[in-house]
Image: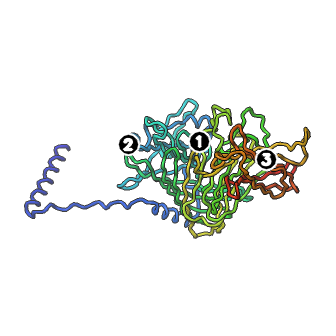
Amino acid sequence: MLSFHRTHLAAAALAVLLLTSATGKTPSTPQRRAAPAFTFATVQRLAQQRAARPYHIRSTPLPRALARLTYEQYSDIRFQPAAALWHGQSMFEVQFFHRGFNFDRRVNVYEVLPSGVQPVSYRPTMFHFGSRVPRITLPANLGFAGLSLHFPLNTPGSKDEVLAFLGASYFRALGRNEGYGVSARGLAIDTASAAGEEYPYFTDFWLVRPAPNQQSMTLYALLDSPSLAGAYQFIVRPGTITQVQVTAQLYPRRVVAKLGIAPLTSMFLYGRGSARRRFDDWRPAVHDSDGLMMQTGSGEWLWRPLDNPRQLEVNRFMDDNPKGFGLIQRDRNFSDYEDPNSQFERRPSYWIQPLGNWGKGGVELVEIPSDEEIHDNIDAYWVPSAPVVPQKPIRFSYLLSAYLNSGDRWPPGGKVVATRFGPVMRGTTPVSGMRLVLIDFAGGDLNSLLAVQPVHADVSAQGATVSHVLVQRLPENGHWRVTMDVKPTGDQPVDMQCYLDLYGKALTETWTYQWTPPGT
């Protein structure tokens, strides 16, 4: 066979040579047609086509043995770094999450190359199965539960996780020296509604192969749910502040009562000076985020401390074309938590900056009662006023920034650094039905003002009367403290606002808080 093959090739070469000699031209060979470029527009077409059909779960079934894994057993399945996509070929590498435990849905993953698109196939050898994992026969087409992007974020010699997608439409981004805390989601549908929440899923990912020294990466995703399908583009830029630019095009199948854009999810068990701390715990505070920060369309900065209420609380801050919002972790000292294992001081803040005009709507904050720190109980997202109707596409874009400290960037002026509550005392006797509120401000021009400056607290309250308002500069730390006595006028929650000004010019963001008096 080998000699025949060589003879056949020699004869073919001779035929070409004779033909060239006779015509003076080299015979043309059929050219392969270049594959069409895979772009965000391609994903939009796929999402639109999917939305035109009835919804169904596209994942292959999860083997029962994998579904029965405990959290500890599932955590003992680890990806082998040497099996990462683009290992040793790029500044970015991609690792994958195994299916199992609660992560039952399969996501399809593809690599986008100049020559076209090719699937990334699952292989059991990509993973290390620890001693706690029972022996399981794994199907060849099992697929992945999610993926994570790695980049030399903290040290040049190793690649750290910078972005991860795992479960429904959840994703997490990390900046330099950060640990996981708050999460982002692709979309929220009917969160905290009587009908119950609907969870969309990312079903497909397309990873655009970066150049060897490229320091940003693009990936596309297709989202699907009973109510809609959507195309997503993510541009990831790792750094001290890691930024993820998100562009989405949604194709509704049916009416959606409440659409949550750029949703964030976090945990707040209790904080320093919490109004309703009810936990027997040695730590001063336990939370992934301690406040909701907003910048309105008019430019005003708002700060709303988070709470762990006794019953579900939903508040919507109405606005027109917001400039930004986010769930923020401001307490950055170890002494704020005293927990060397959890390291809450390293949990990132997420800031959402809309790109383009988002129109009328509101930032909705959902606070869910929780007795354990393992549960996420805080949600925040933008709810547009425009109705969601079938066959009418919705497009939005925003920039997500994950950071530890923003300096004077978010916000640029003075900010709230502490909120505390206590009894109103008359001598040694607490006054029934009243509450002492203390708010500390710092930063911006406040830091350069002497205590003799007539800094004024602009205070308002709905559902309560406020008295004995006092502003003072604390010599111990330079903070400016506002104290006030608050007395409810009825049995409804009390909404309070406060900011500092000097000669009528605002010096700080506006502290806003909803207090539910005991017994209401």
User: Around disc 1, counting alpha carbons within 10 Å, would you say few (fewer than 14), some (14 to 19), or many (20 or more)?
Assistant: some
Q: CA distance from mark 1 to mark 3?
A: 35 Å
Q: What amino acid type is highlighted by mark number 3?
A: Thr
Q: Which residue is mark 2?
A: 89
Q: What amino acid type is highlighted by mark number 2?
A: Gln
Q: Nearer the viewer, mark 3 or mark 2?
A: 3
- 520 lies left or right of 117: right
What label sits on residue 404 in the rendered view?
Answer: none
User: Around disc 2, counting alpha carbons within 10 Å, would you say few (fewer than 14), some (14 to 19), or many (20 or more)?
Assistant: few
In this rendered view, identify the residue nearer to me: 40 or 11.
40
Secondary structure at badge 3 equals strand
Tell me whether the residue at label 1 lies in contact with that at label 3, contact meaning CB atoms closer than 8 angstroms: no
Q: CA distance from mark 3 to mark 2?
A: 59 Å
Q: Residue at x 64, y 68 (%)?
A: 386
Residue 336 pos. (x, y %): 68, 36
User: Around disc 3, counting alpha carbons within 10 Å, would you say few (fewer than 14), some (14 to 19), or many (20 or more)?
Assistant: some
What label sits on residue 180 in the rendered view?
Answer: 1
Q: CA distance from mark 2 to mark 1?
A: 27 Å
Tell me whether the residue at label 3 lies in contact with that at label 2, contact meaning CB atoms closer than 8 angstroms: no
Residue 273, located in which quarter of the rendered image? top right
In this rendered view, identify the residue nearer to me: 149 or 268.
268
Decide which of tag 3 and tag 2 comes sooner along the chain.
Answer: 2
Tell me whether the residue at label 2 lies in contact with that at label 1, contact meaning CB atoms closer than 8 angstroms: no
In this rendered view, identify the residue nearer to me: 62 or 203.
203
Decide which of tag 1 and tag 3 comes sooner along the chain.
Answer: 1
Residue 357 pos. (x, y %): 57, 65
Q: Which residue is mark 3?
A: 483
Residue 408 pos. (x, y %): 59, 49
Q: For the N terminus, give its image quadrant.
A: top left
Q: What amino acid type is highlighted by mark number 1?
A: Tyr
- 139 lies left or right of 335: left
Residue 41 pos. (x, y %): 46, 63
